[in-house]
Amino acid sequence: MPNKQLLSRTKPLLQTSLDYDLAHVDPTISDIIQHEALRQEITINLIASENYVSRAVLEATGSIMTNKYAEGYPGKRYYAGCSWIDQIETLAINRCKEVFGAEHANVQPHAGSQANMAAYLALLNPGDTIMGMSLSEGGHLTHGHAVNFSGKLYSVIHYGVHPETELLNYDEIERLAHQHKPKLIIAGASAYSRIIDFARFAQIAQRVGAYLLADIAHIAGLVAAKLHPDPVPYADVITSTTHKTLRGPRGAFLLSKNILAERIDRAIMPGSQGGPFMHTIAAKAVAFKLAQEPSFVTYQQHVIDNAQIMAKTFNDLGYRLVAGGTDNHLFIIDLRSKHLTGLQAQSALEKAGITVSRSTIPFDPAKPWITSGIRLGTPSITTRGMTRTEATEIAHLVDEVLSYHDNDQHLQRIKQRVEALCLKFPIY
Ligand code: DSN
């Protein structure tokens, strides 16, 4: 251990750069960050894939861990000076395995796309067939979209939802799997509000001899809290981001059985990434620790409760919800009966201080840039302490914005009410 005097001299460096001297060195960037901090503070964030990290996660992310190169893995690095780095990454790996009950974890992926890329590299050869949910029905770019590496390197079969129920169409997925014999089936979504049946996916994959990849980026927090069925017993590989419901830093991780551990690790480094972001891995370790606290389970339950009460309120107000409602942290509103596009709604809501992402609905007649829906999620409002009362109030505010979407004066008045509500629930 270094002596105490030396250690106390490094203390300021362990604080975030915001607390240190950014305002002096680069007032322009500092000022922009302060504006963004204010924007976050006084707007209602309903983007389903975002959250607010704890101060502890923020501090680790802004720490001197960013200074270190550490290509390789704990105990096997290509650089000297990695003893503390090794401790951090080992803790992150062990905590990640504990949270999800997995045999193997790799905490180095920089983002969800890199985690998926590594999973494909580990399991497939270029030209192999993969099957994933189409982006327009709720999937993700990396699940085989034509403009993405996944759609260019692999032969892709897309599945979607049932036209009437808008639920995952497992019978059709099984039929497609038998017909096309994919080497990999991807179960996971960016805009699907119902439970994903990983056991059923595993059965289909087993029957056609495919690997099963569960991409739990959106629902990782719910899975960690055991409020969504667990993919770990069923999937060969699991990928996830850390910054959505899981409430960690921007980043990702991979889980697998031990038998695939070496292939997964080699697919990240040297396969697709270089030096790991050790400041982010330190912050992931903090997030995995926090995910094991009882308050985390309570938080995830409130995320679901808030989503369900909001969905019910919209339903009562006459809106049509995709798949009829939600079992998780998000839901999608079909705006066609309101004669609004997703783009128009998103823009009116932003003027009123409510941030959402527009979303395609299944079989959307509108172009992907325009869309016919909006996706609303509750991880962020729940982190700031809002409960069912505020969730209901927010649904009414959204409804009012959509009703007065072309009346800028009224949107300004709603914005003031939004700010007043936000100020009662400070983020930090
Ligand atoms: N962009 C993310 C989302 O909003 O769902 C998915 O990666």
Image (tube, rainbow, N blue to C red):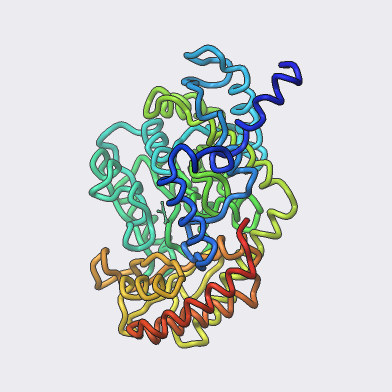
- Give above or below for 156 relative to 301: above
Which residue is located at x 66 percent, y 65 percent? 385
Q: Is residue 346 left or right of residue 390?
A: left
Q: Is residue 26 above or below residue 178?
A: above
Ligand 1 falls in quadrant: bottom left
Q: Residue at x 50, y 83 (%)?
A: 315
Q: Is residue 337 above or below residue 184?
A: below
Residue at image position (46%, 82%) is 413
- Residue 244 position in % (x across, y down): 52, 53
Residue 32 in the image, given as x and y percentages of width and height: 43, 51
Q: Which residue appears at 23% of the width and 49% of the height?
A: 146
Which residue is outermost to the top?
80
Give residue 303's position: percent from left, percent from top: 61, 64
Q: Is residue 240 visible?
A: no
For this rendering, which residue is in front, 180 or 270? Answer: 270
Q: Quadrant of the N terminus?
A: top right
Quadrant housing residue 210: top left
Who is closer to the viewer here, 8 or 49?
8
- Which of the 4 image quadrants contains residue 410? bottom left
Left or right of residue 66, residue 90 in this image? right
Compare residues 43 and 170 and report the one nearer the observer. Answer: 43
Q: Is residue 70 above or below residue 337?
A: above
The C terminus - image quarter? bottom right
Quarter of the figure with residue 360: bottom left
